[in-house]
Image (cartoon, rainbow, N blue to C red):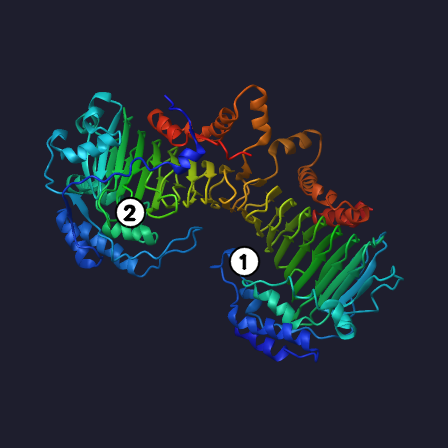
Amino acid sequence: MEPLTQQLERDFKVTGNSWIDRIRKEAFQSLAQLPYPTSEQEEWKYTDVEPIVGAPFRLAERKELLVPFEKRKHLTFSGIHAIRRVFVNGYHCPKLSSTEPLPQGVIVDNLATILQNNPKRVEPYLSRYAKDQNNPFIAINTAFFQEGAFLYLPKGITLEHPIHLVYFSQSNGAAAVSHPRTLVIAEEGSEARIVETYIGDGSYWTNAVTEIVLGENARIHSCKIQEESAEAFHLSTLFIHQNRDSRASSHVISLGGKITRNDVRALLDAEGSEVTLNGLTMASDNQHVDNQTLIDHAKPHSTSDELYKGILDGKSNGVFNGRIVVRPNAQKIRAQQTNKNLLLSDDAKMNTKPLLEIHADDVRCNHGATIGRLDENQLFYLRSRGMGEAEARTLLTYAFASDMIQRLAYGPLETYLEILLLQRLGHAEEELR
Amino acid sequence: MQEEAKTLKEITEEEYQWGFVTDIEEERIPSGLDEKIIQLLSEKKGEPEWMLEWRLRAYRHWLTLKEPKWANVHYGPIDYQAITYYSAPKKRQELKSLDEVDPEIRKTFEKLGISIEEQKRFSGVAVDAVFDSVSVATTFKEKLAELGIIFCSFSEAVQKHPDLVKKYLGTVVPHNDNFFASLNSAVFSDGSFCYVPKGVRSPMELSTYFRINAANTGQFERTLIIADEGSYVSYLEGCTAPMRDENQLHAAVVELIALDNAEIKYSTIQNWYPGDKNGKGGIYNFVTKRGKCAGKNSKISWTQVETGSAITWKYPGCILAGDNSVGAFYSVALANHYQQADTGTKMIHIGKNTRSTIISKGISGGHGQNTYRGLVRILKRAAGARNYSQCDSLLLGDKCGAHTFPYVEVNNSSSQLEHEASTSKISEDQLFYCRSRGLSQEDAVNLVVNGFCKTVFKELPMEFAVEAQKLLGVSLEGAVG
């Protein structure tokens, strides 16, 4: 435990801006009261953070990086025109980012630049929602983030193209940590689609925090594609704060990383708000993927829909912990939560815990969870039609995952993920094209 | 069979019917808890040395434990030194026949509808009546003995069947299992013991009726049921207590053991005093119940109707160790007034092709908080295990809460597991449908609530099903707007 604390103190710097220094300092000081989570804590029961916090991680340094050729293709989606911002080891990399004229008033920039030039823009929002008494990693991000993405959508603006944020990490031997921070502010009636890609090379730790604030009637579709390297640790927390009649959706696609922990928290803080949380995990070998979601129905007449699916192969470990809270007097709530898991190997494990905490009576809340393997009858049917065993399994596994792709409801992204999935399932790239 | 349906309002405001106190002479030991008290208690019961050793071991372990705080219930601190750990009706001698039972006690049980004498004539159920800390009477002993079934109080079993007790006591719930189980192991005063020999099918329902009478006491009973190979037994338990302003602690332990091809069916109607309308008084019901399907093809099923207690903390579980063994849990839990219930089950699948079913129905009214907390764990070697869980909650007011905390842990790929849960107010559509068919609002609500609990009630033995329906004969008048 010592190494991380020591390096934290060494890396703590002041920026000179009184407000930002204050929140950083508060976050840093709060760490003293926030011990690293252990399996004693309910939210961390199945995830051991010792490999992360016990290693001597140092804050990644800014440097010119050569993104390996085979990884470079992930920086762009073929066939999708996107507003792209690329970050390498948590630092903005203008060379790899796109430049295009943006609609009047829209800001897509480096968070550090905004903090320097126009902190007033950020002050009311940054770190206001990303708070948690039980999760020190959020405080660590707040105290140490270097750069990140800032997105501002003025009233009534709809962005035609998605915003693609790429967080690339690379370590050259030494264990490096980056704390990417993303802040999205969508004013009344605005709409945008955001894709975050986390990818990298070598062994490193990504500790990301994203805050999304939706104004009245705003719509944000967010998608996180996690393709970290096999030795990487990935911790991320997404906060969604919703105003009246706003619609938010989040897709968390977890494919890479050694230990992955995703926290998604949606606060439906006004009537008429709706949130959709989707997640797809594909794990194999010794991967560990922990998904934690919280949907907090704070006000009446709000709706949530959640579907998380996991496909676990090898000796992988899956965790799902979904909490739905309906606060007192938050009537007329509809909440639906489903967690389905496919275990492909006898050594894979799944722990699921869907929680309902209901303090109002006029609600309709359901949750369901299943864990099982591929249906023998379906396999038999495919085999009887002349399909090989391996192919039949791949097809059925793909079918299990395919509705998660459809739920993205955005053609070009669906195609991209489809290819990614089929690759994971063992198809050569040439076949797919 | 069914009395006129009571409205929810009546039920909510109804006085607890079983809240009277019986004025009998009681013998009690000083309050407080230390090794001397345990020795005194053990001495009073004339227990052999090994039993005292076992108690002291549990007590020493208990001292190292802290009271668990993880349950979703809230209560003030319990002063374990203020509790009297032994209270018994005085002048207790070996009873030759039931007529020798203290007439006051007999009256009490008659008031409760458990007439010890009349039980003889009804021939349906063999009853072991536990009054405060001790078992006062067991009916039908001889008839059962003819078949080789041992059904007696726990103290008697310690004296007469020490080998069986020694062999099985603590094998399912060890003395160091948890805080309340350790406390129980140290101070348990009495309870029921039942042994069904090989191949015997118990011809009647066995039943224990628990009654707390004395003030400032805790009731710590221990029940041990062993079903030997190929046997079958159905066991019922019921409980009531007087109305008192202070909270009383009830920390029982129940251990069930089913050997090869045996089946145990365990049903509970728990109606301890739940406290008054403002949440004052009531029983703290902190119970550890666990069954072990030790043998192949064995089966254990728990059915419970939890309507009483200020706080219920109870997770009857099954350890499915034998191959092809089956566990089942059926529960209706009602939390009214300021009642808090944190209840559910644990199904641990160890053997191959083990199956378990969980059906839980929670009803919350008033300021009640109802929590389902369950664990289904499938170990790696439990190939082909199967579980189905369903947890439904019905909310009858806007100040109550219903919570569902299921834990599902699967460690192999050949198992199949489903869990579903829903929380809702009574369905407007269903009510509308019934209304459109000419039913009154009240009848419609009654019908829907009855339907809600039906899957659990049908698991209860007939006598209990009637009682349970009466207890829950809730018409939601005024609750639906």
Circle 2 SS class: loop
Give the chain letter at badge 1: A
> Mark 2 and mark 1: span between their CA atoms?
33 Å
Where residue B206 appears, as percent x and y from the top left, is 27, 30
- x then y, percent, for residue A159: 83, 54
Q: Residues within 10 Å of mark 2 (few under 14, many from 20)?
A: some
Q: Residue at x 60, y 29 (%)?
A: B429
Identity of the residue drawn at 40% across and 24% down? B4
Secondary element at tag 1: loop
Asked whether residue B353 is in view, the answer is no
What amino acid type is highlighted by mark number 2? Gly
* Quadrant assignment, res B330: top left
For disc 1, the neighbor class at 10 Å (few under 14, some 14 to 19, many from 20) is some
Q: Residue at x 18, y 52 (%)?
A: B52
- Picture layout, residue B51 above or below residue B24: below
Residue behind mark 2: B170
| Side (left or right) of B463 relative to A101 | left
Residue nearer the viewer, A235 or B81? B81
Q: Position of residue A420 (x, y in %)?
A: 74, 50
In the picture, measured across the screen, residue B447 lies left or right of residue B205, that is right
Residue bearing the label numbered 1:
A47
Q: Amino acid at mark 1?
A: Thr
Question: Looking at the image, is A227 positioned above or below residue B130?
Answer: below
